[in-house]
Amino acid sequence: MAADASALPAAPAFERKSCPPEAVRQRAALLDAPVVFTNGCFDLLHRGHVTYLAQARALGASLVVALNTDASVRRLGKGEDRPVNTLADRMAVIAALECVDLVTWFDADTPLELIEAIAPQVLVKGGDWSVDRIIGASGVIARGGRVVSIPFIHQRSTTALLERIRTL
């Protein structure tokens, strides 16, 4: 027997994890500390992404993830057809992850404005970023926080995955 559609919630609970940038300071202030911040495109979610996000969350009590807008992804030069998934879709997938507490976005070339607004205790990027190249690191360190570059366990990339799909 089919479920009565009127009995279903309007939206899944994970959708409440999404937050516009103008409200992120207030929403992040309600999270348990230490707050961990990371950012990225997270276009086609793969094992490398979810492992990285779980490791980032393990560095604190809450994890905030900021996603590049579609225009910001295109400016990164990842390819004319990127992102594959829209910002709204990427945010929903990231928000559905248990390890993520809050998801927002940025359209600038860097997430510096968000990092300054949130003032996380821990700032994290993947192993392809050395600590001295991580945007916002100096401010986090000056406030007594820490900056971590998490080494890759699973060598995966969305670009490589797309190339593989195109050759099948």
Image (cartoon, grey):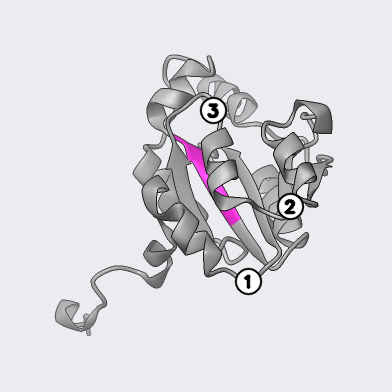
Answer yes or no: do the residues labelled 2 and 1 have beta carbons within 8 Å? no
Is 144 in the magenta? no
Going from N to C along the chain, the mark reached first, 2 or 1, is 1
Going from N to C along the chain, the mark reached first, 3 or 2, is 2
User: Please, what secondary structure does the residue beneath circle 1 have?
Assistant: loop
The secondary structure making up most of the magenta span is strand
Inter-mark Cα distance, 3 to 2: 35 Å
State the residue at coordinates (71%, 39%). Answer: 139
Q: Residues within 10 Å of mark 1 (few under 14, many from 20)?
A: few
Q: Amino acid at mark 2?
A: Val
State the residue at coordinates (82%, 33%). Answer: 131
Answer yes or no: do the residues labelled 3 and 2 have beta carbons within 8 Å? no
Inter-mark Cα distance, 2 to 1: 13 Å
Is 67 in the magenta? yes
Residue 66 seen in the current view: yes
- The image position of residue 159, as x and y in percent, is 60, 25
Q: Which mark is residue 66?
A: none
Count of numbered tags:
3
Quick check: 77 above or below 55?
above
State the residue at coordinates (53%, 42%). Answer: 114
- The image position of residue 142, as x and y in percent, is 78, 43
Q: Quadrant of the C terminus?
A: top right
Q: What stretch of residues is rendered in magenta?
A: 64-68
Identify the image quadrant of residue 35: bottom right
State the residue position of label 3.
Answer: 165
Residue 45 seen in the current view: no
State the residue position of label 1.
Answer: 32
Going from N to C along the chain, the mark reached first, 3 or 1, is 1
State the residue position of label 2.
Answer: 122
> Mark 3 against mark 2, which lies toward the viewer?
2
- The image position of residue 98, as x and y in percent, is 58, 67
